[in-house]
Structure formats: C-alpha cells, structure tokens
Image (cartoon, rainbow, N blue to C red):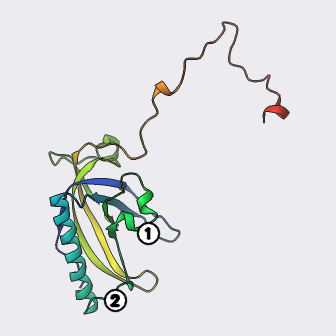
C-alpha cells in the first residue's frame, strides 16, 4: 500500500519551470514526467500556514514510511527556502521564497478561473503567473535516490497574471530604423571572408 499525504491546497502561488502539457526527462534514463515548481511567500499569512502544513505532512509520511523520523541529512526534501540553496536562489523570482517542486507521470488537470480545461496553445498557464494547486506528498526510499519526500503534481488553476520569468518578447524599441539607399538590395556577397569571418 502506497503512503500519501492528505491533499494540500496552495492558493495564489507563483508558477515556475512548468512542464504541464508535455512530460520531460531531465537526466538520461529518467522517465519523462510532468513537472512544476510553486513559490510561496513566507511573509504572507496564508502562505505561511501552507508552508507549515507542508512540513507537517512531510514529517507524517516519513514517520509512516520508516517508523521514525530519519536523521537530519539522511533524506532529501522537494521543498525548502530558496535562499538556502545556492542554485535555486539564483533563479528569477526565488529570492526570499519558499519553493516546492512537484512532478507526476500522469498529466495534471489544467484549468482557468472558471474551471474550464486549458491547453498549452491557450497560453493561460506560464512561468511567472499565479495559480492555485492541489498537491500530495509521498515518501521516497530508492537505492540510488535515497530517502526523501516528493510531491505529486495534480491540478493547476490559473489565478492571476504575473510577470513572465525570462520569456518576455523583445520590444521593437530596442532597435533603430535602418536607412536604406534605393540602389541597395541588402546583398552581402561583397564581404571579405578572410577579414570578416
């Protein structure tokens, strides 16, 4: 019998690194999975309560799996404060945030505010927007991956827009207009290959 936590609902959290519509394998030999990371602000009252519940449920599944809480350092967690992780704190929007990374081999249900299902082409769910989501936690005990707690990605609902992470389209204002003489056709066959390449 698999061990899974109660459903944990996260509201108005920021979506990061979403792979909601196409599964992806990040390492050779891995099974492709649907994935998303959610960012919570510890200074927000509701988010602080959700972080507390995540930690409580994580401890619960670890004890249920191993009979007692493993020694600190003997297990990995799929969540934490980004500032304590050198790689994560460098990501856009992660500073001062609590993150939880989720995945699933089953495609998550993706919906808009009115609970209508959306697809990738709709552009509703993107890195940087704010969403509601339900997750569950489960304990890992793998010969190679070791002990730990992982989170299941279940459903993602668009909540409100946010600045997109690293995907903003370049503005035409970055460039100047190009003056072209009437007799120019843009040919480049007069380049000196030795000097210019």
- Tell whether 54 sits left or right of 93: left
Q: Which residue is at the far bottom?
A: 67
Whichever of labels 1 and 2 marks the residue nearer the N terminus, that label is: 1
Compared to 57, does 173 lie above or below?
above
Pointer 1 with pointer 2, Cβ within 8 A? no
At which x and y percent is residue 120? 34, 46
Secondary structure beneath label 1:
loop
Task: Please give the name of the residue rendered at 53% of the width and 25% of the height, measured from the top-left corner.
Answer: 175
Q: Which quadrant would residue 72 be assigned to in this image?
A: bottom left
Viewer-proximal residue among 132 and 83:
83
Q: Quadrant of the C terminus?
A: top right
Mark 1 neighbour class, 10 Å CA radius: few under 14, some 14 to 19, many 20 or more: few
Compared to 129, does 20 lie above or below?
below
Viewer-proximal residue among 99 and 112:
99
Q: Which residue is mark 2?
A: 71
At which x and y percent is residue 178? 59, 17
Q: Quadrant of the N terminus?
A: bottom left
């Amino acid at each position: 019998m698999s061990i899974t936590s109660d459903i944990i609902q996260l509201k108005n959290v920021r979506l990061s690194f979403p792979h909601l519509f196409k599964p992806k394998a990040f390492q050779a030999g891995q099974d492709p999975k649907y994935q998303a990371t959610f960012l919570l602000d510890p200074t927000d009252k509701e988010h602080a309560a959700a972080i507390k519940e995540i930690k409580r449920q994580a401890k619960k599944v670890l004890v249920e799996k191993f009979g007692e809480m493993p020694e600190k350092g003997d297990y990995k967690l799929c969540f934490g404060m980004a500032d304590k992780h050198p790689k994560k704190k460098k990501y856009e929007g992660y500073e001062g945030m609590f993150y939880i990374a989720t995945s699933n081999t089953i495609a998550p249900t993706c919906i808009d505010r009115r609970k209508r299902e959306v697809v990738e082409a709709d552009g509703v769910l993107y890195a940087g927007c704010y969403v509601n989501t339900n997750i569950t936690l489960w304990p890992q005990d793998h010969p190679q991956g070791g002990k730990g707690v992982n989170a299941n990605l279940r459903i993602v609902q668009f909540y409100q827009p946010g600045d997109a992470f690293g995907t903003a389209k370049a503005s035409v204002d970055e460039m100047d207009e190009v003056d072209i003489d009437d007799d120019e056709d843009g040919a480049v066959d007069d380049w000196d290959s030795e000097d210019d390449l």
